[in-house]
């Protein structure tokens, strides 16, 4: 499935958040003030006469997007990562929106929804997060909900590179990959129960050639951490074994993956699943 999104000309994310004018104004200000200076401009020049956005409006706009159900699913993380710069977010259009001529909106791609590239939303949220972080204590909402929202913003989607230039047969663009530490970190806030599915998503994000047999994993192993570690080692990915997070592991041990297969309690079962 990840190859479908890698090779797709356009991918669509259907969001439920119905952004109001004040929310779009927040994204507009972030895009016009910071982003359009470094990108090729779309459409007309800067729209004049927009009101300033308050900190409360900025946080509310970020919360609507970050906590949208589209961002809560683990498979969506894989799809958006694989699609990279071709992922387009569609938001239900509220009444009386005034967004004609806005550069950040892809007017030509949707007449019924508000269409914005995922990469643009990522950049706007990153700018807005830096503005609201110093004022988090006085923003509306419980401390727990605000912490959860800020975590979702911090790990919204992995930042992608610019779209490759050139012509590709069947749109077969180079695929993006990341190491396992990045994949596991972003997957942490996504809703998914089955260990086998999580392993498949991590392997797809990292582009691993060697995979665990997920049918045997479900029967033999219920520890995601054990399977993730074995999956990393057999593919030569040592991003989870840095000394800072594994104080009991020496650099010499990290260079000898075979020692992990012999140590209890999990490796014998997980290695059977690998075989």
Image: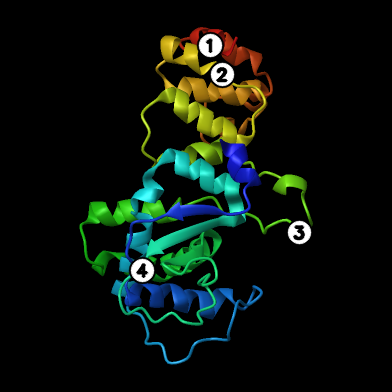
Element class at badge 3 = loop
Q: Position of residue 261 (x, y in %)?
A: 58, 12
Of tags 4 and 1, which is closer to the observer? 4
Along the viewing direction, whichever of 196 and 114 lies nearer the viewer: 114
Residue 205 in view of the camera: no
Label 4: few (<14), some (14–19) or many (≥20) C-alpha neighbours in 10 Å: some
Q: Which residue is mark 3?
A: 165
Element class at badge 4 = loop
Q: Position of residue 225 (x, y in %)?
A: 46, 24
Q: Quadrant of the C terminus?
A: top right
Q: Which residue is mark 2?
A: 212
Q: Earlier in the sequence, mark 1 or mark 3?
A: 3
- Dot 2 and dot 1 residues touching (CB under 8 Å): yes
Q: CA distance from mark 4 to mark 2?
A: 44 Å
Q: What residue lies at 60% left-to-right and 40% top-to-bottom?
A: 4
Label 1: few (<14), some (14–19) or many (≥20) C-alpha neighbours in 10 Å: many
Against 269, is 233 above or below?
below
Residue 93 bears which disc, if any?
Answer: 4
Q: Earlier in the sequence, mark 3 or mark 2?
A: 3
Q: Which residue is mark 1?
A: 273
Along the viewing direction, whichever of 143 and 10 lies nearer the viewer: 10
């Amino acid at each position: 499935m990840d190859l479908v999104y890698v090779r797709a000309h356009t991918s669509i994310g259907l969001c439920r958040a119905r952004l109001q004018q004040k929310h779009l104004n927040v994204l507009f200000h972030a895009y016009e003030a910071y982003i359009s200076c470094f990108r090729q401009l779309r459409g007309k020049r800067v729209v004049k006469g927009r009101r300033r956005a308050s900190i409360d409006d900025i946080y509310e706009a970020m919360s609507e997007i970050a906590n949208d159900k589209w961002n809560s699913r683990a498979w969506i993380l894989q799809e958006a990562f694989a699609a990279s710069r071709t992922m387009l977010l569609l938001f239900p259009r509220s009444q009386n929106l005034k967004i004609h001529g806005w550069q950040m909106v892809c007017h030509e791609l949707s007449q019924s929804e508000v269409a914005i590239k995922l990469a643009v939303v990522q950049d706007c949220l990153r700018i807005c997060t830096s503005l609201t972080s110093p004022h988090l204590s006085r923003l509306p909402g419980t401390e727990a909900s605000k912490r959860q929202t800020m975590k979702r913003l911090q790990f919204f989607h992995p930042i992608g590179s610019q779209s490759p230039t050139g012509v590709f047969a069947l749109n077969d663009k180079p695929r993006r990959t990341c190491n396992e530490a990045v994949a596991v970190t972003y997957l942490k806030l996504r809703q998914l129960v089955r260990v086998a599915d999580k392993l498949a998503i991590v392997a797809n994000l990292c582009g691993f050639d060697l995979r665990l047999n997920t049918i045997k994993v479900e029967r033999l192993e219920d520890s995601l951490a054990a399977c993730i570690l074995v999956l990393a080692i057999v593919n030569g990915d040592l991003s989870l074994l840095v000394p800072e997070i594994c104080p009991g592991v020496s650099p010499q041990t990290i260079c000898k993956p075979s020692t992990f297969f012999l140590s209890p309690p999990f490796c014998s079962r997980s290695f059977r699943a690998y075989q």
